[in-house]
Image (cartoon, helix red, strand yellow):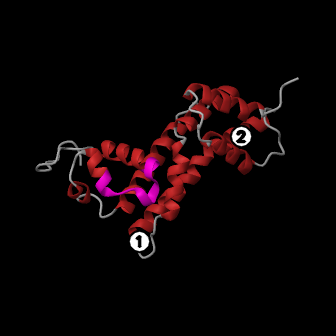
Amino acid sequence: MKEGNNMGRDRKFSTFDLFLCTKKLIIQTGYEGFTIGQLATQLNVSRAAIYKYYQNKDELLLDFMIEEMKNTLKSFSSIPEELPFLEKVNTLLQKIFMYKDLHLILGIQEVIPTKGAPLLEGKKRHLSLMHRELYKPLIHLVQQGKSEGYIEMDLPNDLLLGFIFQSISIPNHSGMDTEKAFFYTKKLILNGILKNK
């Protein structure tokens, strides 16, 4: 799979290419519609080339999700601790917006059958632990916002985080420009729907 591997007639493809095509396809087709055959066509390789690395689509999808989660965690943890709260919130919301498909992608793991497949069960457990890690910087930020008087103390953290993630996951049916969509989503999250008087 790495660029240097010899694949006979197949052109070489990297893990990056594989996961990029996987992401596009899984978002378009969902779990049921996703096949190794379609993926091979997208990559311009044979199905056998992919089966050399993955026994089935479930193993591939879970590895892809783990990689997506790793990238998101790395991105979230790169926010400087010393940033003022409002700057930190802005940076974090931009990053969540950048990874807005993650929520949809992670939802797919629920339908992946793992019963009697210890390897897949292990990958799912790993994903679950990573998911908890993802919330740590967010909970820390919410706590900072509360202690600095930006966020109301009585708002439950879980509900707040769910609200932020769900707001960012709202589909852009109107086809609004991405920057504009982010601007309005951020405005709604930070200011609500009521006009400031």
Q: Residue furthest bottom?
A: 116
Mark 1, Cα crowd under 10 Å, few <14 / some 14-19 / many 20+, is few
Label drawn at residue 142: 2
Q: Position of residue 118 (x, y in %)?
A: 41, 71
Element type at mark 1: helix
Q: Residue furthest right?
A: 197
Q: How many marks?
A: 2
Please state the extent of the stretch shown in magenta in the rendering. Answer: 26-38
- What amino acid is found at the position of numbered circle 2 in the picture? Val
Q: Residue at x 71, y 35 (%)?
A: 189
- What amino acid is found at the position of numbered circle 1 in the picture? Pro
Check residue 32 for magenta coloring: yes
Magenta-drawn stretch, dominant element (helix, strand or loop)? helix
Instruction: Decide which of 50, 156 is in the foreground and name it.
Output: 50
Could you tell me how far apart the alpha carbons at marks 1 and 2 are, in whole angstroms?
37 Å
Q: In the rendered view, tell whether residue 159 sits above or below residue 151.
A: below
Q: Position of residue 46 (x, y in %)?
A: 20, 53
Q: Residue at x 82, y 39 (%)?
A: 152
Q: Give the residue at mark 1.
A: 118
Q: Residue at x 58, y 31 (%)?
A: 94
Which quarter of the figure is the C terminus placed in? top right
The reply to whether residue 82 is visible in this rendering is no
Instruction: From the viewer's perspective, tell me whether residue 95 is left or right of residue 86.
Output: left
Q: Quadrant of residue 164?
A: top right
Check residue 164 for magenta coloring: no
Q: Quadrant of residue 31?
A: bottom left
Q: Residue at x 15, y 50 (%)?
A: 7
Q: In the rendered view, tell whether residue 91 sits above or below residue 115.
A: above
Q: Position of residue 92 (x, y in %)?
A: 60, 34
Instruction: From the viewer's perspective, tell me whether residue 194 is left or right of residue 11.
Output: right
